Amino acid sequence: MRPLQISPDTAVKLAEKLNVPLEQLMHMPQHILLQKLAQLDKEDDKS
């Protein structure tokens, strides 16, 4: 599996937002990343 195709700046921001290490984020399967982003979006909508 190849690393995610996102910019370094985006990767850093996502890692901070998801509270995961940058290296872990880059090797995270895309479908899991999308699930986490959807979950974050739901939490943001509630607040």
Image (cartoon, grey):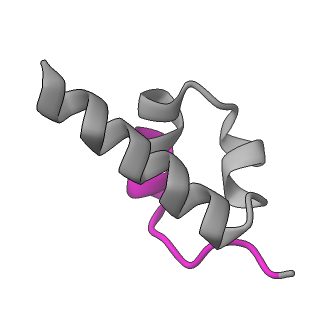
Q: Quadrant of residue 4?
A: bottom right
Q: Position of residue 46 (x, y in %)?
A: 16, 25
Which residue extends farthest top? 47
**Pick the front one: 47 or 15:** 47
> Which stretch did the figure color magenta?
2-13
22 left or right of 9?
Answer: right
Q: Position of residue 11 (x, y in %)?
A: 50, 52
Q: Position of residue 35 (x, y in %)?
A: 52, 55
Residue at 39 percent across and 55 percent down: it is: 10
Q: Position of residue 47 (x, y in %)?
A: 12, 18
Q: Quadrant of residue 2?
A: bottom right
The magenta stretch spans residue 33: no
The magenta stretch spans residue 9: yes
Residue at 53 percent across and 38 percent down: it is: 15
Q: How many marks?
A: 0
Which residue extends farthest right? 1
34 left or right of 42?
Answer: right
Residue at 56 percent across and 79 percent down: it is: 5
40 left or right of 29?
Answer: left
Residue at 51 percent across and 47 percent down: it is: 36
Please tell me whether residue 23 is drawn above or below residue 7 in the rendered image.
Answer: above
The image quadrant where one finds the N terminus is bottom right
